[in-house]
C-alpha cells in the first residue's frame, strides 16, 4: 500500500519535472531528467545535472561518467536497482556551465520532494554544487572552496540522515589517478548504507 502511494507521488512529481518551464533551462533542454531507481532505497545519490547523453535519452548516468559509475558500482557489488539516483538540476546546463543560484533554488524543490518521498537514511551528493546544496539543507558547515576536498569520503550526521559526500565519477575522466581513492570511498559508502 505504502509502495503504491509512494510510486504515485513520485509519478506525479516526475510529470511536473518533465513539464517544468520555471527557468530558461527549459528552452535549451531536450528532456528534464527525473530521478530513477528503487523507491525504497536506503541511499540517494545526488549528482549536479544531466549531461548531453542524458538530455538526449532522458535517463540518468548513461554518458561517459555513467560508464565510470557503473564500473565503480560493479567493483563494490552494488546494483543500480538497489539505489535511487537523481540530480540537483534536472536539465542539462548549456556548455556544462555552472548552475545559477535561481536555477538551484527552483530545481531544489524537486530534489527536496524526492528526498522526502524516498526518505533514505543515507544521501551521497556528488561534486561541489550537490554537496554545497545538501550541506546547506541539513545545516552542515561547509569548508572554504580551497578546503572543500576535505569533506570527500567523510561521514556527516544530520536530521537522522547520514550525508556522505563523494567526488563525481566524471572526475576520473580528467584524472584517472583518483580512481582507486574513489573506489575506496564508494566502498565506505556501501558499508554506510548497507549497515
Image (tube, rainbow, N blue to C red):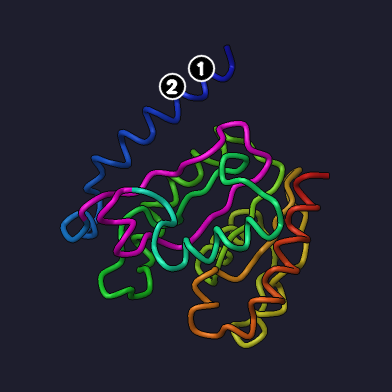
- Quadrant for the N terminus in the image: top right
Out of 127 and 112, give the one closest to the viewer.
127
User: Mark 1 near mark 2, Cβ–Cβ under 8 Å?
Assistant: yes
Residues rendered magenta in the picture = 30-58
Left/right of residue 113 with respect to residue 189 in the rendered view: left
- Residue furthest to the top in view is 1
Crowd tier of the residue under label 2, counting other residues whose Cα lies within 10 Å: few below 14, some 14–19, many 20 or above = few
Could you tell me which residue is drawn at 36 percent across and 36 percent down?
A: 14
Crowd tier of the residue under label 1, counting other residues whose Cα lies within 10 Å: few below 14, some 14–19, many 20 or above = few
The span from disc 1 to disc 2 (Cα, nearest Å) is: 6 Å
Q: Considering the numbered disc 1 on the image, is that residue within a helix, a strand or a loop?
A: helix
Image label count: 2
Q: Position of residue 128 (x, y in %)?
A: 54, 72
Q: Name the residue carrying label 1.
A: 4
- Residue furthest to the right in view is 195
Q: Position of residue 47 (x, y in %)?
A: 50, 60
Residue 42 among magenta residues: yes
Relative height, residue 40 to residue 164 (above, below): above
Could you tell me which residue is drawn at 65 percent across and 54 percent down?
A: 138
Amino acid at each position: 500500500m505504502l509502495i503504491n502511494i509512494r510510486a504515485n507521488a513520485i509519478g506525479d512529481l516526475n510529470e511536473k519535472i518533465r513539464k517544468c518551464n520555471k527557468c530558461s533551462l527549459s528552452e535549451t533542454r531536450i528532456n528534464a531528467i527525473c530521478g530513477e531507481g528503487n523507491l525504497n532505497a536506503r541511499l540517494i545519490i545526488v549528482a549536479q545535472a544531466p549531461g548531453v547523453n542524458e538530455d538526449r535519452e532522458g535517463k540518468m548516468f548513461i554518458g561517459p561518467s555513467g560508464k565510470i559509475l557503473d564500473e565503480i558500482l560493479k567493483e563494490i557489488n552494488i546494483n543500480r536497482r538497489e539505489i535511487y539516483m537523481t540530480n540537483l538540476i534536472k536539465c542539462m546546463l548549456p556548455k556544462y556551465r555552472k548552475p545559477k543560484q535561481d536555477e538551484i533554488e527552483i530545481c531544489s524543490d524537486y530534489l527536496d520532494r524526492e528526498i522526502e518521498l524516498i526518505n533514505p537514511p543515507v544521501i551521497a551528493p556528488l561534486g561541489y554544487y550537490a554537496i554545497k546544496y545538501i550541506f546547506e539543507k541539513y545545516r552542515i558547515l561547509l569548508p572554504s572552496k580551497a578546503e572543500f576536498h576535505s569533506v570527500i569520503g567523510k561521514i556527516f550526521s544530520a536530521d537522522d540522515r547520514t550525508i556522505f559526500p563523494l567526488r563525481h565519477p566524471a572526475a576520473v575522466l580528467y584524472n584517472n589517478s583518483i580512481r582507486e581513492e574513489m573506489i575506496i570511498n564508494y566502498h565506505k559508502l556501501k558499508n554506510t548504507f548497507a549497515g
